[in-house]
Image (tube, rainbow, N blue to C red):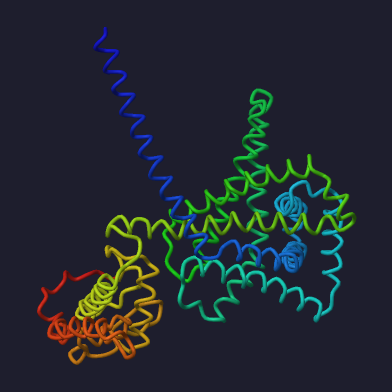
Amino acid sequence: MAGIRIDRWRRRAVTWRRYAFTAGRLGRFFGYAARRYLADGCPLQAAGLSYVSLLAIVPLFAIGLAVLAGVPALETWRGDVQAFVLRTLVPEAGAEASEQLATFVENASRMTGPGLAFLAVAAILLMANVSGAINAVWRVAEPRPLALRFAIYWAVLAFGPVLIGASLSLSGYAFAAVEWFGAGAIGNGLLDLSWLLSLALAVFGFALLYFVVPNRAVRPWHALAGGLVAALMFELLKKAFGLFLAHFSSYEMIYGALAAIPVFLIWMYLAWTAALFGAEVAAAMPEWHTAKARGRAIAGPGARLALALSLLARLVAARRTGVKPREGRLGRGLPATPGEVDVTLRQLRRAGYVARALGGRWNLARNLDSVTIADLAEVLHLGLAPGVDWEPAARAAVEELAAAADAPMRHSLGALFAETSEPEKSREP
Protein backbone atom coordinates (compact mmCIF):
# COMPACT_ATOMS: atom_id res chain seq x y z
CA MET A 1 0.00 0.00 0.00
CA ALA A 2 2.80 2.35 0.91
CA GLY A 3 4.56 1.53 -2.36
CA ILE A 4 1.44 2.42 -4.37
CA ARG A 5 1.17 5.75 -2.50
CA ILE A 6 4.84 6.55 -3.14
CA ASP A 7 4.47 5.71 -6.84
CA ARG A 8 1.40 7.97 -7.06
CA TRP A 9 3.29 10.87 -5.46
CA ARG A 10 6.22 10.27 -7.82
CA ARG A 11 3.93 10.51 -10.86
CA ARG A 12 2.40 13.71 -9.49
CA ALA A 13 5.84 15.18 -8.91
CA VAL A 14 6.84 14.39 -12.51
CA THR A 15 3.63 15.96 -13.80
CA TRP A 16 4.08 19.14 -11.75
CA ARG A 17 7.71 19.39 -12.82
CA ARG A 18 6.59 19.19 -16.44
CA TYR A 19 4.02 21.93 -15.81
CA ALA A 20 6.66 24.08 -14.10
CA PHE A 21 9.06 23.57 -17.01
CA THR A 22 6.37 24.54 -19.54
CA ALA A 23 5.38 27.59 -17.46
CA GLY A 24 9.03 28.62 -17.26
CA ARG A 25 9.43 28.37 -21.03
CA LEU A 26 6.24 30.38 -21.58
CA GLY A 27 7.42 32.98 -19.09
CA ARG A 28 10.76 33.35 -20.87
CA PHE A 29 9.05 33.58 -24.25
CA PHE A 30 6.59 36.26 -23.13
CA GLY A 31 9.47 38.12 -21.50
CA TYR A 32 11.26 38.07 -24.86
CA ALA A 33 8.08 39.25 -26.62
CA ALA A 34 7.69 42.08 -24.06
CA ARG A 35 11.30 43.21 -24.59
CA ARG A 36 10.72 43.10 -28.35
CA TYR A 37 7.51 45.11 -27.86
CA LEU A 38 9.41 47.87 -26.05
CA ALA A 39 12.38 47.78 -28.45
CA ASP A 40 10.05 48.28 -31.44
CA GLY A 41 8.51 51.35 -29.81
CA CYS A 42 5.04 49.79 -29.76
CA PRO A 43 3.76 52.04 -26.90
CA LEU A 44 4.46 55.05 -29.14
CA GLN A 45 2.96 53.23 -32.14
CA ALA A 46 -0.20 52.53 -30.13
CA ALA A 47 -0.45 56.21 -29.16
CA GLY A 48 -0.14 57.25 -32.81
CA LEU A 49 -2.76 54.74 -33.93
CA SER A 50 -5.09 55.97 -31.16
CA TYR A 51 -4.85 59.51 -32.47
CA VAL A 52 -5.45 58.42 -36.06
CA SER A 53 -8.37 56.27 -34.88
CA LEU A 54 -10.01 59.33 -33.33
CA LEU A 55 -10.13 60.87 -36.82
CA ALA A 56 -10.71 57.82 -38.98
CA ILE A 57 -12.59 55.13 -37.06
CA VAL A 58 -16.03 56.67 -37.60
CA PRO A 59 -15.52 57.22 -41.37
CA LEU A 60 -14.20 53.66 -41.62
CA PHE A 61 -17.29 52.12 -40.06
CA ALA A 62 -19.58 54.59 -41.78
CA ILE A 63 -18.31 53.41 -45.16
CA GLY A 64 -18.59 49.79 -44.06
CA LEU A 65 -22.18 50.21 -42.89
CA ALA A 66 -22.98 52.16 -46.03
CA VAL A 67 -21.75 49.15 -48.05
CA LEU A 68 -24.22 46.95 -46.20
CA ALA A 69 -26.98 49.50 -46.71
CA GLY A 70 -26.25 49.60 -50.43
CA VAL A 71 -26.93 45.86 -50.88
CA PRO A 72 -30.59 45.01 -50.14
CA ALA A 73 -29.77 41.38 -49.33
CA LEU A 74 -27.36 42.50 -46.59
CA GLU A 75 -29.54 45.25 -45.12
CA THR A 76 -30.70 42.95 -42.31
CA TRP A 77 -27.11 42.63 -41.05
CA ARG A 78 -26.62 46.37 -40.68
CA GLY A 79 -28.11 46.67 -37.19
CA ASP A 80 -26.23 43.63 -35.90
CA VAL A 81 -22.91 44.91 -37.25
CA GLN A 82 -23.54 48.38 -35.81
CA ALA A 83 -24.33 46.95 -32.36
CA PHE A 84 -21.23 44.73 -32.50
CA VAL A 85 -19.02 47.68 -33.47
CA LEU A 86 -20.34 49.77 -30.61
CA ARG A 87 -19.79 47.00 -28.07
CA THR A 88 -16.22 46.60 -29.32
CA LEU A 89 -15.39 50.24 -29.95
CA VAL A 90 -15.96 51.54 -26.42
CA PRO A 91 -17.24 49.42 -23.53
CA GLU A 92 -20.45 50.76 -22.02
CA ALA A 93 -20.82 53.08 -25.00
CA GLY A 94 -24.54 53.58 -24.46
CA ALA A 95 -27.48 54.51 -26.63
CA GLU A 96 -26.35 58.09 -27.28
CA ALA A 97 -23.22 57.00 -29.14
CA SER A 98 -25.31 54.52 -31.12
CA GLU A 99 -27.70 57.26 -32.20
CA GLN A 100 -24.82 59.55 -33.17
CA LEU A 101 -23.16 56.86 -35.28
CA ALA A 102 -26.47 56.01 -36.95
CA THR A 103 -26.99 59.70 -37.74
CA PHE A 104 -23.47 59.97 -39.16
CA VAL A 105 -23.98 56.96 -41.41
CA GLU A 106 -27.28 58.36 -42.64
CA ASN A 107 -25.61 61.70 -43.40
CA ALA A 108 -22.71 59.95 -45.10
CA SER A 109 -25.09 58.21 -47.49
CA ARG A 110 -26.26 61.64 -48.68
CA MET A 111 -22.77 63.07 -49.16
CA THR A 112 -21.57 64.28 -52.54
CA GLY A 113 -18.42 63.09 -54.27
CA PRO A 114 -15.89 65.28 -52.40
CA GLY A 115 -17.39 64.35 -49.02
CA LEU A 116 -17.24 60.62 -49.78
CA ALA A 117 -13.67 61.04 -51.03
CA PHE A 118 -12.73 62.64 -47.69
CA LEU A 119 -14.27 59.71 -45.80
CA ALA A 120 -12.38 57.25 -47.99
CA VAL A 121 -9.08 59.10 -47.48
CA ALA A 122 -9.58 59.14 -43.69
CA ALA A 123 -10.37 55.41 -43.65
CA ILE A 124 -7.38 54.56 -45.85
CA LEU A 125 -5.17 56.73 -43.63
CA LEU A 126 -6.04 54.54 -40.65
CA MET A 127 -5.45 51.31 -42.56
CA ALA A 128 -2.13 52.60 -43.93
CA ASN A 129 -0.95 53.41 -40.41
CA VAL A 130 -2.05 49.98 -39.16
CA SER A 131 -0.23 48.33 -42.06
CA GLY A 132 2.93 50.32 -41.34
CA ALA A 133 2.87 49.43 -37.64
CA ILE A 134 2.33 45.70 -38.30
CA ASN A 135 5.10 45.60 -40.92
CA ALA A 136 7.43 47.39 -38.49
CA VAL A 137 6.76 44.64 -35.92
CA TRP A 138 7.78 42.02 -38.50
CA ARG A 139 10.84 44.15 -39.45
CA VAL A 140 9.74 44.19 -43.10
CA ALA A 141 12.39 45.96 -45.16
CA GLU A 142 10.25 46.48 -48.26
CA PRO A 143 6.47 47.12 -48.19
CA ARG A 144 4.07 45.87 -50.82
CA PRO A 145 3.65 47.90 -54.01
CA LEU A 146 1.33 50.88 -53.58
CA ALA A 147 -1.29 49.57 -56.01
CA LEU A 148 -1.49 46.24 -54.16
CA ARG A 149 -1.82 48.01 -50.82
CA PHE A 150 -4.71 50.11 -52.08
CA ALA A 151 -6.38 47.00 -53.48
CA ILE A 152 -6.14 45.36 -50.03
CA TYR A 153 -7.54 48.48 -48.34
CA TRP A 154 -10.53 48.58 -50.66
CA ALA A 155 -11.10 44.85 -50.17
CA VAL A 156 -11.20 45.43 -46.40
CA LEU A 157 -13.67 48.30 -46.83
CA ALA A 158 -15.89 46.26 -49.12
CA PHE A 159 -15.78 42.80 -47.55
CA GLY A 160 -14.95 43.50 -43.90
CA PRO A 161 -18.52 44.42 -42.92
CA VAL A 162 -19.87 41.48 -44.91
CA LEU A 163 -17.60 39.04 -43.02
CA ILE A 164 -18.61 40.54 -39.67
CA GLY A 165 -22.26 40.33 -40.60
CA ALA A 166 -21.92 36.72 -41.75
CA SER A 167 -20.12 35.78 -38.53
CA LEU A 168 -22.80 37.44 -36.41
CA SER A 169 -25.49 35.70 -38.45
CA LEU A 170 -23.84 32.32 -37.82
CA SER A 171 -23.71 33.20 -34.13
CA GLY A 172 -27.43 33.90 -34.25
CA TYR A 173 -28.09 30.50 -35.81
CA ALA A 174 -26.03 28.87 -33.05
CA PHE A 175 -28.07 30.61 -30.36
CA ALA A 176 -31.28 29.61 -32.08
CA ALA A 177 -30.13 25.99 -32.16
CA VAL A 178 -29.25 26.08 -28.45
CA GLU A 179 -32.65 27.52 -27.59
CA TRP A 180 -34.39 24.93 -29.82
CA PHE A 181 -32.69 22.08 -27.98
CA GLY A 182 -33.48 23.54 -24.56
CA ALA A 183 -31.73 26.67 -23.37
CA GLY A 184 -33.49 26.43 -20.02
CA ALA A 185 -31.54 23.31 -19.15
CA ILE A 186 -28.30 25.04 -20.01
CA GLY A 187 -28.82 28.02 -17.70
CA ASN A 188 -25.89 30.39 -17.94
CA GLY A 189 -24.29 28.26 -20.62
CA LEU A 190 -25.82 30.51 -23.27
CA LEU A 191 -23.91 33.48 -21.90
CA ASP A 192 -20.73 31.41 -21.90
CA LEU A 193 -21.40 30.41 -25.50
CA SER A 194 -21.92 34.07 -26.43
CA TRP A 195 -18.57 34.98 -24.86
CA LEU A 196 -16.81 32.09 -26.60
CA LEU A 197 -18.25 33.04 -29.98
CA SER A 198 -17.21 36.65 -29.43
CA LEU A 199 -13.72 35.50 -28.42
CA ALA A 200 -13.47 33.19 -31.44
CA LEU A 201 -14.45 36.06 -33.75
CA ALA A 202 -11.80 38.29 -32.16
CA VAL A 203 -9.13 35.56 -32.45
CA PHE A 204 -9.99 35.07 -36.12
CA GLY A 205 -9.92 38.81 -36.80
CA PHE A 206 -6.55 39.38 -35.15
CA ALA A 207 -5.06 36.25 -36.74
CA LEU A 208 -6.24 37.37 -40.17
CA LEU A 209 -4.62 40.77 -39.55
CA TYR A 210 -1.30 39.15 -38.65
CA PHE A 211 -1.47 36.68 -41.52
CA VAL A 212 -2.42 39.05 -44.36
CA VAL A 213 -0.90 42.46 -43.55
CA PRO A 214 2.86 41.72 -43.16
CA ASN A 215 4.72 41.60 -46.43
CA ARG A 216 6.19 38.27 -45.41
CA ALA A 217 5.06 34.66 -45.20
CA VAL A 218 3.55 34.07 -41.74
CA ARG A 219 2.74 30.57 -40.56
CA PRO A 220 -0.97 30.18 -39.80
CA TRP A 221 -0.44 28.75 -36.32
CA HIS A 222 1.88 31.66 -35.43
CA ALA A 223 -0.85 34.08 -36.52
CA LEU A 224 -3.45 32.12 -34.52
CA ALA A 225 -1.25 32.15 -31.40
CA GLY A 226 -0.80 35.90 -31.69
CA GLY A 227 -4.54 36.31 -32.34
CA LEU A 228 -5.40 34.29 -29.23
CA VAL A 229 -3.08 36.38 -27.03
CA ALA A 230 -4.43 39.64 -28.46
CA ALA A 231 -8.07 38.53 -28.09
CA LEU A 232 -7.56 37.45 -24.45
CA MET A 233 -5.80 40.72 -23.65
CA PHE A 234 -8.59 42.60 -25.41
CA GLU A 235 -11.27 40.84 -23.34
CA LEU A 236 -9.40 41.46 -20.08
CA LEU A 237 -8.86 45.13 -20.93
CA LYS A 238 -12.53 45.48 -21.90
CA LYS A 239 -13.65 44.09 -18.52
CA ALA A 240 -11.18 46.26 -16.60
CA PHE A 241 -12.13 49.37 -18.56
CA GLY A 242 -15.83 48.70 -18.02
CA LEU A 243 -15.21 48.45 -14.25
CA PHE A 244 -13.28 51.72 -14.36
CA LEU A 245 -16.10 53.52 -16.14
CA ALA A 246 -18.66 52.07 -13.73
CA HIS A 247 -16.87 52.89 -10.45
CA PHE A 248 -14.68 55.89 -11.24
CA SER A 249 -16.94 58.45 -12.86
CA SER A 250 -15.08 61.50 -11.55
CA TYR A 251 -13.62 62.07 -15.02
CA GLU A 252 -17.09 63.26 -16.11
CA MET A 253 -16.92 66.04 -13.50
CA ILE A 254 -13.56 67.16 -14.89
CA TYR A 255 -14.22 66.97 -18.64
CA GLY A 256 -17.99 67.51 -18.65
CA ALA A 257 -19.47 67.25 -22.13
CA LEU A 258 -16.05 66.38 -23.58
CA ALA A 259 -15.64 63.29 -21.36
CA ALA A 260 -16.24 60.95 -24.30
CA ILE A 261 -13.05 62.12 -26.06
CA PRO A 262 -10.43 61.10 -23.43
CA VAL A 263 -12.41 57.92 -22.71
CA PHE A 264 -12.34 57.01 -26.39
CA LEU A 265 -8.61 57.80 -26.71
CA ILE A 266 -7.68 55.77 -23.62
CA TRP A 267 -9.69 52.79 -24.81
CA MET A 268 -8.22 53.01 -28.31
CA TYR A 269 -4.74 53.09 -26.80
CA LEU A 270 -5.45 49.98 -24.73
CA ALA A 271 -7.01 48.20 -27.72
CA TRP A 272 -4.02 48.96 -29.98
CA THR A 273 -1.68 47.89 -27.18
CA ALA A 274 -3.34 44.47 -27.18
CA ALA A 275 -3.28 44.28 -30.99
CA LEU A 276 0.41 45.19 -31.24
CA PHE A 277 1.45 42.84 -28.43
CA GLY A 278 -0.35 40.00 -30.21
CA ALA A 279 1.58 40.93 -33.35
CA GLU A 280 4.83 40.83 -31.35
CA VAL A 281 3.96 37.33 -30.10
CA ALA A 282 3.27 36.10 -33.65
CA ALA A 283 6.46 37.72 -34.99
CA ALA A 284 8.60 36.52 -32.06
CA MET A 285 7.71 32.83 -32.36
CA PRO A 286 10.00 32.00 -35.33
CA GLU A 287 12.74 34.15 -33.78
CA TRP A 288 12.41 32.25 -30.50
CA HIS A 289 12.80 28.89 -32.24
CA THR A 290 15.80 30.23 -34.19
CA ALA A 291 17.45 31.58 -31.04
CA LYS A 292 17.10 28.16 -29.40
CA ALA A 293 18.63 26.50 -32.46
CA ARG A 294 21.75 28.68 -32.59
CA GLY A 295 21.99 29.49 -28.87
CA ARG A 296 21.59 33.27 -29.08
CA ALA A 297 18.95 35.79 -30.13
CA ILE A 298 21.15 38.14 -32.16
CA ALA A 299 23.13 36.86 -35.14
CA GLY A 300 26.83 37.74 -35.06
CA PRO A 301 28.94 38.68 -38.11
CA GLY A 302 29.90 35.04 -38.72
CA ALA A 303 26.26 33.94 -38.72
CA ARG A 304 25.29 36.75 -41.09
CA LEU A 305 28.03 35.78 -43.54
CA ALA A 306 27.04 32.10 -43.26
CA LEU A 307 23.42 33.03 -43.94
CA ALA A 308 24.32 34.93 -47.12
CA LEU A 309 26.50 32.05 -48.32
CA SER A 310 23.74 29.55 -47.56
CA LEU A 311 21.15 31.57 -49.50
CA LEU A 312 23.48 31.90 -52.48
CA ALA A 313 24.30 28.18 -52.35
CA ARG A 314 20.59 27.32 -52.41
CA LEU A 315 20.02 29.68 -55.34
CA VAL A 316 22.91 28.05 -57.23
CA ALA A 317 21.36 24.61 -56.62
CA ALA A 318 17.92 25.93 -57.64
CA ARG A 319 19.31 27.32 -60.90
CA ARG A 320 20.66 23.87 -61.78
CA THR A 321 17.16 22.44 -61.44
CA GLY A 322 15.43 25.39 -63.15
CA VAL A 323 13.48 26.32 -60.01
CA LYS A 324 13.00 29.84 -58.68
CA PRO A 325 12.31 29.34 -54.96
CA ARG A 326 10.24 31.60 -52.73
CA GLU A 327 11.78 33.44 -49.80
CA GLY A 328 10.25 31.07 -47.24
CA ARG A 329 11.70 28.05 -49.05
CA LEU A 330 15.15 29.66 -49.26
CA GLY A 331 15.36 30.17 -45.50
CA ARG A 332 13.68 26.91 -44.47
CA GLY A 333 15.72 24.87 -42.00
CA LEU A 334 18.41 27.55 -41.51
CA PRO A 335 19.09 28.94 -38.00
CA ALA A 336 17.94 32.40 -39.08
CA THR A 337 14.79 34.41 -38.53
CA PRO A 338 12.53 35.44 -41.46
CA GLY A 339 13.55 39.05 -40.81
CA GLU A 340 17.25 38.19 -41.15
CA VAL A 341 16.59 36.30 -44.38
CA ASP A 342 14.58 39.25 -45.67
CA VAL A 343 17.30 41.81 -44.86
CA THR A 344 20.08 39.65 -46.31
CA LEU A 345 18.22 39.08 -49.59
CA ARG A 346 17.63 42.83 -49.91
CA GLN A 347 21.34 43.52 -49.38
CA LEU A 348 22.24 40.93 -52.02
CA ARG A 349 19.70 42.39 -54.43
CA ARG A 350 21.05 45.94 -53.99
CA ALA A 351 24.52 44.58 -54.81
CA GLY A 352 23.18 42.88 -57.95
CA TYR A 353 23.83 39.32 -56.78
CA VAL A 354 20.19 38.18 -56.78
CA ALA A 355 16.95 39.38 -58.36
CA ARG A 356 13.32 39.03 -57.45
CA ALA A 357 11.12 37.34 -60.05
CA LEU A 358 7.35 37.27 -60.39
CA GLY A 359 5.33 35.76 -57.56
CA GLY A 360 7.87 36.64 -54.87
CA ARG A 361 10.44 34.14 -56.19
CA TRP A 362 14.21 34.66 -56.24
CA ASN A 363 17.01 33.78 -58.64
CA LEU A 364 20.69 34.56 -59.21
CA ALA A 365 21.37 37.78 -61.14
CA ARG A 366 25.08 37.37 -61.92
CA ASN A 367 27.90 34.88 -62.33
CA LEU A 368 29.53 34.23 -58.95
CA ASP A 369 32.90 33.12 -60.37
CA SER A 370 34.25 36.67 -60.09
CA VAL A 371 32.79 37.32 -56.63
CA THR A 372 34.94 36.58 -53.57
CA ILE A 373 33.99 36.04 -49.94
CA ALA A 374 35.63 39.40 -49.20
CA ASP A 375 33.31 41.08 -51.74
CA LEU A 376 30.32 39.45 -50.09
CA ALA A 377 31.49 40.57 -46.64
CA GLU A 378 31.71 44.16 -47.90
CA VAL A 379 28.16 43.94 -49.27
CA LEU A 380 26.98 42.79 -45.83
CA HIS A 381 29.02 45.57 -44.14
CA LEU A 382 31.25 42.97 -42.46
CA GLY A 383 34.59 44.07 -43.90
CA LEU A 384 37.71 44.26 -41.72
CA ALA A 385 39.16 47.45 -43.20
CA PRO A 386 39.70 49.67 -40.11
CA GLY A 387 39.74 53.08 -41.80
CA VAL A 388 41.73 56.05 -40.42
CA ASP A 389 42.10 58.05 -37.19
CA TRP A 390 41.98 55.03 -34.87
CA GLU A 391 44.46 54.46 -32.08
CA PRO A 392 47.67 53.01 -33.59
CA ALA A 393 47.54 49.82 -31.52
CA ALA A 394 43.88 49.22 -32.37
CA ARG A 395 44.43 49.87 -36.08
CA ALA A 396 47.47 47.57 -36.18
CA ALA A 397 45.53 44.76 -34.50
CA VAL A 398 42.65 44.99 -36.98
CA GLU A 399 45.02 45.18 -39.97
CA GLU A 400 46.86 42.09 -38.69
CA LEU A 401 43.55 40.26 -38.38
CA ALA A 402 42.54 41.32 -41.91
CA ALA A 403 45.90 40.16 -43.31
CA ALA A 404 45.52 36.76 -41.64
CA ALA A 405 42.04 36.33 -43.13
CA ASP A 406 43.02 37.65 -46.58
CA ALA A 407 43.81 34.32 -48.24
CA PRO A 408 40.56 32.46 -47.44
CA MET A 409 38.52 35.61 -48.05
CA ARG A 410 39.81 35.70 -51.64
CA HIS A 411 38.12 32.41 -52.53
CA SER A 412 35.67 32.72 -55.40
CA LEU A 413 32.06 31.97 -54.56
CA GLY A 414 31.66 30.10 -57.82
CA ALA A 415 34.60 27.84 -56.97
CA LEU A 416 33.36 27.46 -53.39
CA PHE A 417 29.91 26.25 -54.47
CA ALA A 418 31.40 24.04 -57.21
CA GLU A 419 33.59 22.29 -54.62
CA THR A 420 30.62 21.44 -52.40
CA SER A 421 28.48 18.43 -53.15
CA GLU A 422 25.48 19.27 -55.26
CA PRO A 423 22.34 19.44 -53.08
CA GLU A 424 19.40 17.16 -53.61
CA LYS A 425 17.04 18.39 -56.32
CA SER A 426 14.13 20.16 -54.73
CA ARG A 427 10.65 20.06 -56.09
CA GLU A 428 8.73 23.14 -57.13
CA PRO A 429 7.53 24.88 -53.91
Q: Is residue 249 above or below residue 412?
A: above
**Residue found at the far top of this picture:** 1
- Does any portion of residue 79 appear in the rendered image? yes
Residue 419 screen position, x and y as percent:
9, 79
Tell me what residue is drawn at x 24 percent, y 12 percent: 3
Q: Is residue 104 above or below residue 412?
A: above
Tell me what residue is drawn at x 22 percent, y 69 percent: 426
Q: Quick one: quadrant of the N terminus?
A: top left
Q: Is residue 207 left or right of residue 248?
A: left
Q: Report which quarter residue 283 is drawn in.
A: bottom left
Residue 146 screen position, x and y as percent:
56, 81
Q: Is residue 273 left or right of residue 5?
A: right
Tell me what residue is drawn at x 80 percent, y 80 percent: 113
- Does any portion of residue 414 appear in the rendered image? no
Tell me what residue is drawn at x 58 percent, y 55 percent: 205
Residues 382 and 395: in front is 395
Residue 180 screen position, x and y as percent:
67, 31
